[in-house]
Amino acid sequence: MMSMGKTILILGGGTGGVVAANILRKVLPKEHRVALVDRRDSHVFLASLPLVLAGRRRPEQITRSLQRLEGPNIQFFQAEVEQFNPDEKTIRTDQALLSYDTLIIALGAQQQGISGQSQAFNPYNLHEATLLHKELAGFQKGHIVLFISSLPFPGAIAPYEIALLLDSYFQKRGLRRNIQISFITPETRLLEFADPRYSERLTSIMKGRGINVLTKRKAQSLSQGNALALGDGDIPGDMFIGIPHHMGPAPFRDSVLAGPSGWLKVDPASLATCIPDVYAVGDATGIESPVGTWIPKVGFFAHYQAEVVARNLALRYANEEPRFSFVGGASGASMLSSFSRGCFASVDAYASPPRMTLSSPTRLAYLTKMLFEKYWLRSWF
Ligand SMILES: Cc1cc2nc3c(=O)[nH]c(=O)nc-3n(C[C@H](O)[C@H](O)[C@H](O)COP(=O)(O)OP(=O)(O)OC[C@H]3O[C@@H](n4cnc5c(N)ncnc54)[C@H](O)[C@@H]3O)c2cc1C
């Protein structure tokens, strides 16, 4: 019987990989096995990075060992994924060559800094978010410049959340009047995916909190002399917080799975790629909405997509028809607007035209986000 068992290889232990592994553990017939690979030994709950930089979470509170996913038919390998060999159905890692019958790619987006990025803190990296908190704790006055290098970026609402939490952080410390906060983005308007009225709502929340918002600006480089070069001038600052460029994962960017933009092409409902038995989920994919824009790169989508792929696989391996589809929608997510309030967000990315909404700040939205973090870190590990 053992020889009939198939191997499902999951690349990445982020949101998509962790969901896929957990669902397969529950629903996959027992003769099959699952292997999950990640370069790190632990999972980071990225949605809480803004709380790390604001000093409300320590790294160990938002990370979980990936070994905790292991079980009778699930194995974890810590290794760097290097190369995809579709003809042999293998993945080369820096540790070993891994074979698969079915492959689930959940490697997320890869980051690349702008020129001079080392002068800035990357709030999308746990280590740098931790260093940033230390720096903020000693920061008494001056200009903080928060910039988004390019579109698309993961976490549709995360940059705005970071800006608002910076404001709250300095308010609490009684230093806000000594501090200027600028938010620089290439978007034509904040929350570009949403209807303009929600962009206006968000802009007025940010401006109401004294944040200087500059749209349609392209961060080009950061100089030693502490200025951010934009196409049309420089912005001087005393501290820079920069969300780097994001792109499809290197081991696949030049493969037949990637489109011209480098993001992985998938069927929008089944997440199947153009190669049989290979699926891709989450931030690594580039899925177009009905109007041709990229659908947002959010954890809720990575989660639902991984669930669809895992459940359909279990059905296929049990000789049943796959019947789950990703429908491009999520609601109940929330953006923290302070340490006590948040705004509910919902997305319907496959609607024509696509829709995204953002509520006014409420206490309930804040509590929902706090509960979700607890649920995530308890239920999946
Ligand atoms: C600061 C921040 C806040 C966010 N807030 C929210 C939010 O409030 N709500 C929401 O829905 N979404 C949010 N997001 C977005 C959400 O975190 C992502 O959409 C989600 O994590 C994507 O999941 P994924 O599985 O595709 O990739 P990831 O979670 O990024 O996981 C990819 C994994 O692959 C591993 N990996 C990558 N390359 C290799 C390689 N070559 N070899 C081995 N391992 C590799 C990485 O170590 C990582 O563990 C936020 C993101 C950030 C950065």
Image (spheres, helix red, strand yellow):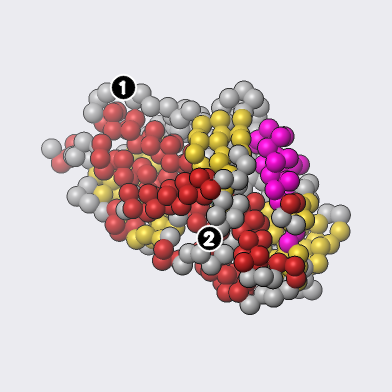
The tag earlier along the polypeptide, 1 or 2, is: 2
Task: Residue at 81% x, 62% y: name it.
Answer: 235
Q: Which residue is most to the bottom?
A: 138
Residues drawn in magenta: 181-206
| Residue holding disc 2 | 51
Task: Estimate the spatial distance between the alpha carbons at disc 1 and disc 2, rounded to whole Å.
Answer: 43 Å
Q: Is residue 356 magenta?
A: no
Which kind of residue does numbered mark 1 sit on? Answer: Glu
Tell me the SS state at disc 2: helix
| Residue holding disc 1 | 321
Comparing 42 with 363, the one in front is 363
The location of residue 268, given as percent across then percent down, is 50, 29
Q: In the rendered view, would you say 218 is above or below 175?
A: above
Comparing 195 with 30, the one in front is 195
Q: Which residue is most to the left?
A: 1
The location of residue 40, given as percent across then percent down, is 41, 61
